[in-house]
Image (spheres, rainbow, N blue to C red):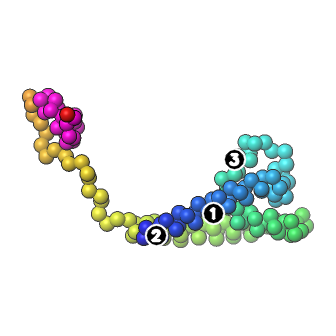
Amino acid sequence: MVEFVRTSLLALAAYGVLGLFFAFVFHLRGLHTLDTGSRGTGLGFRLLITPGIVALWPLLAWRWRAARRGGSFLGGTDSPVSARQLRATHALAWKALALTAPVMVAAALWWRPKEAPSSRIPTSSHAPSAAGSANHLKRGNASAFGVWSPGLP
């Protein structure tokens, strides 16, 4: 299990690094190809969209490649993408999320440790009396919260 988590985190890190590299190149050369309205935008806009570019870099790379080859993923002026097509795509995305989110939560609950880790700090089984609490704290055996701690020499 530890190896699976380590491998998954390594793959996620590699995906993120590739996404950062793609975002840098995409900001320099590809953004205006896919969205002509982004020409002349400031640094704030580019910083705002960078996390999305990093996360969705394979999709953007595919669309950028199609646009460079003369294709259009949005439809041309003579045949734009219909609202019906967009709604169907959004409905498919929501259905996919509705199916995958519970599966991911169930997997996380399944793989979590069955028992809570034990506390390394032993706690006092009884609270010190009001009269003896000052002497008890002076010896360094308990904090104000009743948690045992070794006294300093």
Residue 102 in sight in this render: no
Distance from the alpha carbon under mark 2 to that under mark 3: 35 Å
Marks 1,2: beta carbons within 8 A = no
Marks 1,3: beta carbons within 8 A = no
Q: Nearer the viewer, residue 102 or 128?
A: 128
Figure check: 135 above or below 50: above
In the rendered structure, which disc, 2 or 3, sits on the residue that comes first in sequence? 2
Residue 44 lies left or right of residue 12; in this view the side is right
Figure check: 35 above or below 131: below
Give me the residue at 85% from left, 58% from top. Answer: 33
Distance from the alpha carbon under mark 1 to that under mark 2: 18 Å
Quadrant of the image for the C terminus?
A: top left
Instruction: Label 3: state its secondary structure.
Output: helix
Q: Position of residue 46 (x, y in %)?
A: 74, 47
Q: Which residue is mark 1?
A: 15
Q: Nearer the viewer, residue 106 or 96?
A: 106
Give me the residue at 70% from left, 51% from top. Answer: 49
Figure check: 67 above or below 124: below
Residue 15 lies left or right of residue 128; in this view the side is right
In the rendered structure, which disc, 1 or 2, sits on the residue that comes first in sequence? 2
Q: Which residue is mark 3?
A: 48
Give the label, 2 or 3, closer to the camera: 2
The tag on residue 3 is: 2
Q: Which residues are magenta?
A: 133-152
Residue 38 in sight in this render: yes
In the rendered structure, which disc, 1 or 3, sits on the residue that comes first in sequence? 1
Q: Residues within 10 Å of mark 3 (few under 14, many from 20)?
A: few
Marks 2,3: beta carbons within 8 A = no
